[in-house]
Amino acid sequence: MATNPMQRKARNSFLLGMLVMLLISGVVIALLFMQLLGKMQEEKEELANSVNAYVLNQDVRSGQVITTDMLTLQTVNRSLVPSNATSDLSVIQNYALQDKEGNDIYTKYNSNNEPQLYITIDGTEYEVYQEEETDNYYYNARNNEKQYLELNSVPLVAKVDMNANTLITTELLSKSDNVVQDDVRKQEYNMLVLPVDLSTGDYVDIRLMLPSGQDYIVVAKKEVEIPVIGGVDSADTIWVNLSEDEILHMSCAIIDAYQITGAKLYVAKYTEAGMQAAATPTYPINESTSRLLENDPNILDRAMEEIRARYSNTDGATLRNEYINSVINNQGEQSQTNIQTNMQESITNSKNSRQEYLDSLSAAATTTTTTAQ
């Protein structure tokens, strides 16, 4: 049967349109396929150039203990990561605070935004403390008895202040070397000139400056604790842990500061305690203190060796005679009056601070009793 020309033309147009559509679809599919291949290749290259590294998920202060809960593993571009970045959690875990049973010690923040360590044992969370006399970690059990924790390793501490999202590298961390010897005691001082921004946890040198311009380091790199009295930090009192020889050095320096008009016994902060090494004490003690050091049975052998090495030459005695004893001698009888006045003032300040502390405890107990009723 003959085909109508109009029908034949319409059929040809339809076939041509289908062919064009197929060609366009093929081109689109080819382009999409090429884009997909390119995307896959790009992701493959990006994956090849990516590494895992740990970053902080919170702000950390210099000298603060690092616990594993502070860290988050992130995938980042290899070109943005230092070669010493920490990517293996085992590096952290090897030094993380963890007891012998494998329970992690982790960090939480109190209402004052201060870090505090905790541990969960058999489903119960306990606050972890560090004993000042021995530096051992412990928690208070339900019967309020100290339960000491045996740690698997020495903890890591931050060398510098770090903000959240800081990439952790080995250069930013160090092993804790805060080992307390048997002769260490907590000492209280209220006659020092303190920096306006001093706070608990800061590391300081205690120095003696003379009116002649001489400036000596008495004790070096000590962590400061500021007592809280009536809910407020003390304005003039600090606590520091000192060894027996350091206590004697401080006592000698206090007397010198009291005797010499215009002398200043003051505190100098470390800017980055985790990174900066302790300074070397330079203060020359007097002869009587030197003899006391030599015969003090409470001073450890290691400390005594360091003291003998420090005073093995005549430089210390020369400095003492030239810059300190000469000034004291020039003070005459006034030096003894200065000692009596300043010592009495220190004693009075200690008594007043103690009374304020006891009053705050009494007020807190009264408030608790009233609330309970």
Image (tube, grey):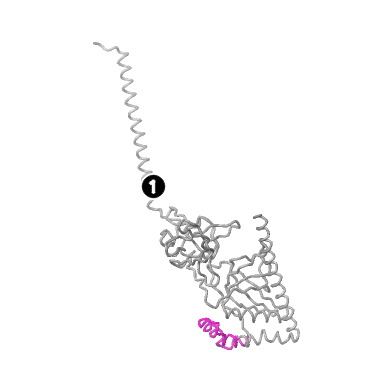
Q: Quadrant of the C terminus?
A: bottom right
Q: Residue furthest top?
A: 1
Front-most of residues 207 and 291: 291
Amino acid type, residue under disc 1 in the picture: Glu
- Outermost residue to the front: 373
List the single residue furthest toward the left.
1
Identify the residue position indicated by label 1 in the image.
43
Q: Is residue 368 above or below residue 188?
A: above
* Residue 87 picture location, percent across and down: 42, 58
Q: Is residue 103 magenta?
A: no
Q: In front: 79, or 125?
A: 125
Q: Main secondary structure of the magenta part?
A: helix
Tally of marks: 1
Q: Is residue 314 left or right of residue 264?
A: left
292 magenta-colored = yes
The residue that appears at 66% across and 68% down in the rendered structure is 195
Q: Where residue 214 appears, x then y in whole percent?
A: 66, 79
Quarter holding the N terminus?
A: top left
Q: Residue at x 61, y 68 (%)?
A: 225
Q: Which element is circle 1 on?
A: helix
Task: Please provide percent x and percent y for residue 132.
Answer: 55, 70
Give the quadrant of residue 260.
bottom right
Within 10 Å of the Cα at label 1, are there few (<14), some (14-19), or many (20+) other Cα atoms?
few
Q: Is residue 264 above or below residue 88?
A: below
Q: Which portion, as a residue range, is magenta?
A: 290-319
Percent position (x, y) of residue 115? 55, 60
Q: Residue at 66% of width from left, 58% of height from top?
A: 369
